[in-house]
Amino acid sequence: MTANIRDRVLVFAVLVTVALVLSAQGKAQAQGGTSAKPAAPSKEGNDKSSSQKTDANYEENDIDVNKPGGARGPKIPWVIVQMVNAKGANIGRATITALNTGGVEVKLDLSDLPPGEHALHFHQVPKCDPPDFKSAGAHFNPEKKQHGLENPKGPHAGDMENFSVGPDGITTATVNDPNVSLGGKNSLLAHGGTALVIHAKPDDMKTDPAGNSGDRIACGIVSH
């Protein structure tokens, strides 16, 4: 074989070898590219799971600060009642808070009241027309009982303990009413609301219909 022919054969052999190597690499890459990938999580499934979790958390807290009383739907955790005296002047407020154990807590923050002990009742009509506040109607009494926490045939749902006012005319007393709610049985907010009324004298806790508690000297509308 001449040198020229031998050189051509060597070149051909090299080209064939290179072609085989390149072909093998291409097949390997193709096989790697078609290997199975983990399926992407379902977006619909994630959205559903996230929604359920959000709803569950919302039910636990159930608070919407954009609504009066700070709650969503019929569940009202608290309401603020602006109180006025017989002259129609603002004397402060009462904060009514629903208790986990049932009933409500009434936190008073009032001034310009006569010193001494006074009766505090929920009345059935959400109206406070001075000077006598008779527009508030009778005591809140959906169960049609007699008046008085010490009355065997009572009490009205709106009956509460007396509270005291200091010599300076200021009170920050807290009184509870276990027989009403802010949504549910005996709700203070049903049918447009109720009224919170302060009387001139203390309640004797037994005399129907108002415990000999005297004139109505302050009033506030309980609503949302």
Image: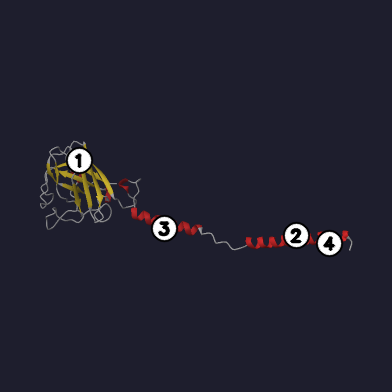
Question: Residue 153, position in %: x, y?
Answer: 13, 58
Residue receiving disc 1:
110
Of callouts 2 and 3, which one flags the residue occurring earlier in the amino acid sequence? 2
Of circles 2 and 3, the one toward us is 2
Residue receiving disc 2:
18
Residue receiving disc 4:
9
Residue receiving disc 3:
52
Query: What kind of element bears circle 1?
Result: strand
Kindly identify the residue that appears in the image at 29 percent across and 50 percent down.
77
Of callouts 4 and 3, which one flags the residue occurring earlier in the amino acid sequence? 4
Question: Label for residue 161?
Answer: none
Q: Residue 11, located in which quarter of the rendered image?
A: bottom right
Q: Residue 128, located in which quarter of the rendered image?
A: top left
Of circles 1 and 2, the one toward us is 2
Question: Residue 88, position in %: x, y?
Answer: 21, 37
Distance of label 1 from label 2 (alpha carbons): 98 Å
Of callouts 3 and 1, which one flags the residue occurring earlier in the amino acid sequence? 3
Q: Is residue 134 among the parts visible in the rendering?
A: yes
Question: Residue 33, position in %: x, y?
Answer: 63, 60
Contact (CB < 8 A) between labels 4 and 3?
A: no
Apparent side of residue 62 relative to residue 161 in the rendered image (left or right): right
Of circles 4 and 3, the one toward us is 4
